[in-house]
């Protein structure tokens, strides 16, 4: 249970976590809660709020509050750690495209071999 990989997999493997990170990665700009919710319509408001708090606590995202006007607005963006995490995601994508059995490219190679 103290294994770094186990702890990381437990956190990252939570439902919606990767999709929230991906949404914040797209365009790499600040996004409001409502923009994230709109992009992920099936996520409940409670889970979105919980995951955003967890991601902020883990240091993968940062929350910026703009109280200069009413209503107060909160913006979320990736931290350096969060951006660095995407090198791992890109490697997983490369692996999946190369080795995924149902990938059209692999099926073509398998049927012509």
Image (spheres, rainbow, N blue to C red):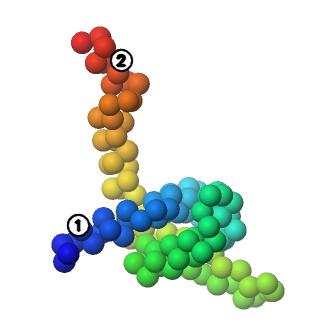
Query: Within 10 angstroms of label 1, few (less than 14), some, or many (20 or more) residues?
Result: few
Q: Is residue 47 left or right of residue 84?
A: right
Q: Which residue is mark 2?
A: 108
Relative vertical location of residue 105 with respect to residue 21 in this rendering, above or below = above
Where residue 111 sits: x, y (%)? 31, 14
Vertically, is 34 above or below 89?
below
Residue that carries the numbered disc 1 in the rendered image: 5
Residue 48 or 55: which is nearer the viewer?
48
Name which residue lies at 33% across and 25% down: 106
Q: Disc 1 to disc 2, how far (Cα)? A: 35 Å
Q: Where on the picture, by quarter, is residue 27?
A: bottom right
Dot 1 falls on a residue whose secondary structure is helix
Question: Which residue is at the front of the view, 108 or 67?
Answer: 108
Quadrant of res 4: bottom left
Q: Residue at x 40, y 78 (%)?
A: 58
Q: Residue furthest right?
A: 70
Which quadrant of the rendered structure holds the C terminus? top left
Quarter holding the N terminus is: bottom left
Residue 101 x %, y %: 32, 31
Q: Answer with left or right where residue 10 lies relative to residue 61.
A: left
How many numbered marks, from 0 up?
2
* Residue count near mark 2 (Cα–Cα under 10 Å), binned few <14, some 14–19, many ≥20: few
* Circle 2: element type: helix
- 83 or 58: which is nearer to us? 58
Residue 52 shown left or right of residue 82 in the figure: right
Residue at 38% in and 53% down: 89
Residue 93: x %, y % from top left: 37, 45
Task: Tell me where residue 54 appears, x and y as whole percent.
Answer: 46, 77
39 vs 75: above or below: above
| Dot placed on the residue nearer the N-terminal end, 1 or 2 | 1
- For the point 46% across and 74% down, the residue is 55
């Amino acid at each position: 249970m103290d294994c770094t990989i186990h702890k990381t997999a437990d956190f990252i493997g939570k439902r919606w976590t990767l999709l929230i990170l991906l949404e914040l990665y797209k365009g790499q700009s600040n996004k409001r809660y409502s923009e994230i919710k709109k992009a992920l319509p099936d996520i409940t408001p409670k889970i979105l709020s919980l995951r955003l708090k967890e991601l902020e606590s883990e240091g993968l995202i940062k929350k910026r509050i703009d109280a200069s006007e009413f209503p107060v607005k909160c913006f979320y963006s990736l931290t350096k750690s969060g951006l660095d995490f995407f090198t791992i995601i890109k490697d997983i994508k490369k692996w999946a495209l190369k080795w995924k059995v149902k990938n059209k490219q692999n099926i073509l190679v398998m049927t012509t071999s």
